[in-house]
Image (cartoon, helix red, strand yellow):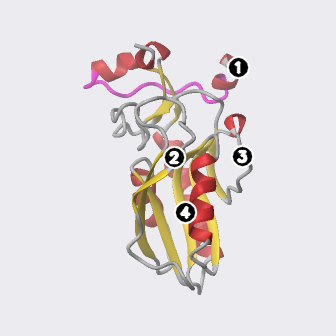
Amino acid sequence: MAAKLALFAGFRIKYKGALELHQDIEQVLVSREQIKTRVKELGAAISRDYAGKDLLVVGILKGAIIFLADLVREITIPLTLDFMAVSSYGSSTTSSGAVRILKDLEVPVEDKHVLIVEDIVDTGLTLKYLLENLRARQPLSLRTCTILDKPERRMVDVEVDYRGFCIPDCFVVGYGLDYAQQYRHLPDICVLKPEVYRR
């Protein structure tokens, strides 16, 4: 684990005004500068791939909201934006395996090219459920985008079409990702100290 984390190491923690948060963070895994660069690249790729198509971007709440806001501003083609909220975690650090819809789409997906935007794909259970659910609604196409992919945790096969970063199996927060509804607002993607979520 230490060797894998070292691949991302070397970034100073920049929370001078938030000492309590600083004390909870083990290290910055992906810096805000890296995120900004990668989101621009993803936006350019999506704009190219969906040029001339009726694109519906589906953001998965709450974790994807910050990534989604940045991503759609880098997409240069017309799009429709809608949201779904699903639950499989509760306040724990591992997926419960049972997925349920908390908020459904308001826009019909039939005859649209749908892009699901997620914060992180780890076990793949949530994304598999979303793909099956939306595929049954007969979109013209259905693809996926995530800022983080944790393939070591995969329990089911799911296709990730656009990914920001592959990361090792560590518990991360920031840039929309939370632990017990905290840390979402941090601008970097950070490794949370184990003693914080094992309290």
Mark 2–mark 4 Cα distance, whole angstroms, equals 19 Å
136 in relation to 29, above or below: below
Taking depth in this image into account, of 25 and 81 the one nearest to the observer is 81
Residue where numbered disc 3 is placed: 156
Q: Amino acid at mark 2?
A: Ile
Q: Position of residue 183 (x, y in %)?
A: 36, 33
Mark 4–mark 3 Cα distance, whole angstroms, equals 17 Å
> Does residue 171 appear left or right of residue 163 in this picture?
left
Which secondary structure lies at badge 4?
strand
The image quadrant where one finds the N terminus is: top right
Q: Position of residue 58 (x, y in %)?
A: 48, 66
107 in relation to 99, above or below: below
Q: Are marks 2 and 1 in contact (CB under 8 Å)?
A: no
Residue 169 lies in quadrant: top right
Q: Position of residue 194 (x, y in %)?
A: 49, 16
Which secondary structure lies at badge 3?
loop
Q: Earlier in the sequence, mark 4 or mark 3?
A: 4
Residue where numbered disc 1 is placed: 3
Q: Amino acid at mark 1?
A: Ala
Q: Residues within 10 Å of mark 2 (few under 14, many from 20)?
A: many
Q: Earlier in the sequence, mark 1 or mark 4?
A: 1
Q: Residues within 10 Å of mark 1 (few under 14, many from 20)?
A: few
Mark 1–mark 4 Cα distance, whole angstroms, equals 32 Å
Q: Which mark is residue 116?
A: 4
Q: Amino acid at mark 3?
A: Val
Q: Are marks 3 and 2 in contact (CB under 8 Å)?
A: no
| Residue at the (61%, 79%) spot, across then down | 138
Mark 3–mark 1 Cα distance, whole angstroms, equals 26 Å
Taking depth in this image into account, of 125 and 163 the one nearest to the observer is 125
* Part of the protein shown in magenta: 6-18
Q: Which is closer to the viewer, label 4 or label 3?
A: 3
Residue where numbered disc 2 is placed: 35
